[in-house]
Image: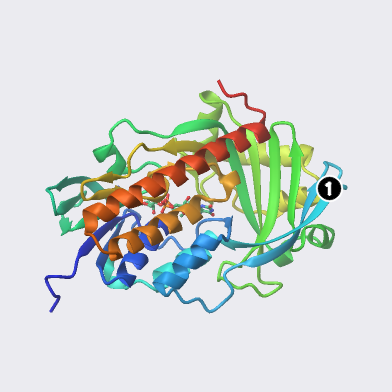
């Protein structure tokens, strides 16, 4: 039987932010339940991201085991012009992973019976020590802490901090993945195990290799991951980008397999006209192109009694910082460390909030200035 003294956390959102928090709190002895809106497994979605030290520190703290290496090493940074000529090259080794590699490692370390799919939080109530989460299906759950890890469009945030919404930056990122062996030899040779860019006015394309869908880092089984930042004006142009193949206007992204035929034709044609030969091949060989609006979000507070905001629910930094996932890992690790110290939960949350707000703001400012410079956006 469960001891009544074991503290209990309710984590809303079962993506990386939620799983980082859930596994870190379990490592300090908490009982944790994760409530994820999506009814289906999410492990085949997502693209690549840079593997940061914060994620590795979190994995060590939470005892997350992984059989394969977590990422693919790149050696140099190459800058190509539109003709495909190398205009600049510098050594800059780093490791890139993929969303599904991290997700699979985290979810395998969390008890399946405590990960509740198809649970959409719609409301919450709290008193000084307890929080109750209320779900769309009429069920509820009670805990000592509720952590809103429900992403940029957070329902938890809308309940505790109404009016704090993300803003649109003025540009989007088109994305895709290509299996290593599906790329023609000339393109593979130029892009192989390097971080490669093509920067033009108001346009940045980049590419790096990531593990295969099954997490394999064996040569021949990995994937090329590409991104292309392009402007899309708020209004009809952005609406067209974010309207899926069924005519539904999505809030801020079109996942793989849901792009409209018109937008797919548009980005493929753009690739034919503007991409260097190797990047052109990446776009040609991509089956499911997807797209995300680049957003900005920062909150003035992350702690609201026994309700917290973490990950993208609190801060959405621009992707040029390569820091969203690292920040979610850092939020979770420091939360567990703070709560595990002496002095009680409420005092720990005050300290945690102060540190995370200052880091979120720093990363936000840095990302906005870098992104606007890259895309030629003048700040008003
Ligand atoms: C399927 C998927 C693929 C992604 N792929 C990449 C990638 O390739 N590269 C990258 O850098 N970042 C990717 N991201 C974003 C990345 O996970 C985040 O930027 C970062 O890791 C912080 O994550 P988060 O958990 O705070 O937010 P998110 O990843 O946005 O997760 C929020 C989660 O909360 C759930 N949710 C939302 N509202 C509710 C509600 N009311 N009740 C219950 N659950 C709710 C959502 O379904 C989602 O799973 C992806 C996110 C998802 C969901």
How many numbered marks appear?
1
Q: Quadrant of the N terminus?
A: bottom left
Residue drawn at (50%, 41%) of the image: 362
Q: Quadrant of the C terminus?
A: top right
Q: Which residue is mark 1?
A: 88
Residue 247 at least partly seen: no
Q: Residue furthest top?
A: 380
Residue drawn at (42%, 70%) of the image: 61
Q: Nearest the camera: 48 or 75?
A: 75
* Residue 372 in the image: above or below residue 34: above
Q: Is residue 351 left or right of residue 317?
A: left
Residue 375 at least partly seen: yes
* Residue 137 in the image: above or below residue 9: above
Q: Nearest the camera: 298 or 334?
A: 334
Residue drawn at (56%, 27%) of the image: 237
Q: Position of residue 35 (x, y in %)?
A: 28, 58
Query: Element type at marker 1?
Result: strand
Q: Position of residue 263 (x, y in %)?
A: 60, 37
């Amino acid at each position: 039987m469960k001891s009544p003294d074991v503290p209990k956390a309710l984590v809303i959102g079962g993506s990386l932010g939620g799983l980082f928090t859930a596994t870190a709190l379990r490592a300090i002895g908490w009982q944790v339940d994760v409530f994820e809106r999506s009814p289906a497994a999410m492990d085949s979605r997502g693209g690549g991201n840079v593997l940061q030290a914060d994620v590795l520190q979190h994995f060590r703290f939470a005892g997350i085991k992984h059989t394969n290496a977590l990422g693919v090493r790149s050696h140099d940074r190459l800058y190509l012009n539109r003709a495909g000529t190398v205009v600049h090259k510098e050594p800059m080794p780093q490791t890139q992973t993929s969303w599904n590699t991290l997700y699979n490692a985290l979810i395998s370390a969390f008890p399946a019976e405590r990960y509740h799919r198809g649970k959409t939080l719609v409301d919450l109530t709290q008193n000084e020590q307890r929080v109750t989460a209320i779900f769309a299906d009429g069920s509820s759950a009670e805990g000592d802490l509720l952590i809103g890890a429900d992403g940029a469009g957070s329902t938890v945030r809308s309940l505790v901090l109404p009016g704090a919404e993300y803003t649109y930056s003025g540009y989007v990122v088109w994305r895709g993945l290509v299996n290593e062996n599906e790329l023609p030899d000339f393109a593979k040779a130029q892009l192989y195990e390097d971080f490669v860019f093509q920067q033009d006015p108001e346009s940045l394309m980049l590419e790096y290799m990531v593990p295969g869908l099954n997490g394999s880092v064996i040569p021949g089984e990995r994937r090329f991951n590409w991104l292309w930042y392009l402007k899309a004006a708020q209004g009809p142009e952005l609406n067209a980008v974010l309207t899926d193949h069924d005519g539904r206007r999505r809030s801020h992204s079109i996942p793989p397999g849901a792009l409209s035929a018109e937008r797919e034709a548009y980005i493929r044609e753009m690739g034919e006209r503007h991409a260097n030969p190797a990047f052109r091949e990446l776009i040609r060989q991509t089956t499911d192109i997807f797209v995300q609006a680049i957003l900005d979000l920062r909150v003035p507070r992350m702690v609201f009694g026994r309700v917290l905001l973490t990950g993208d629910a609190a801060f959405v930094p621009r992707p040029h910082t390569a820091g969203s996932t690292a920040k979610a890992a850092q939020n979770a690790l420091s939360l567990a460390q703070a709560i595990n110290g002496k002095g009680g939960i409420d005092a720990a949350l005050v300290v945690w909030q102060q540190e995370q707000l200052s880091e979120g703001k720093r990363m936000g400012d840095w990302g906005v200035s870098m992104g606007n410079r890259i895309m030629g956006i003048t700040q008003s």
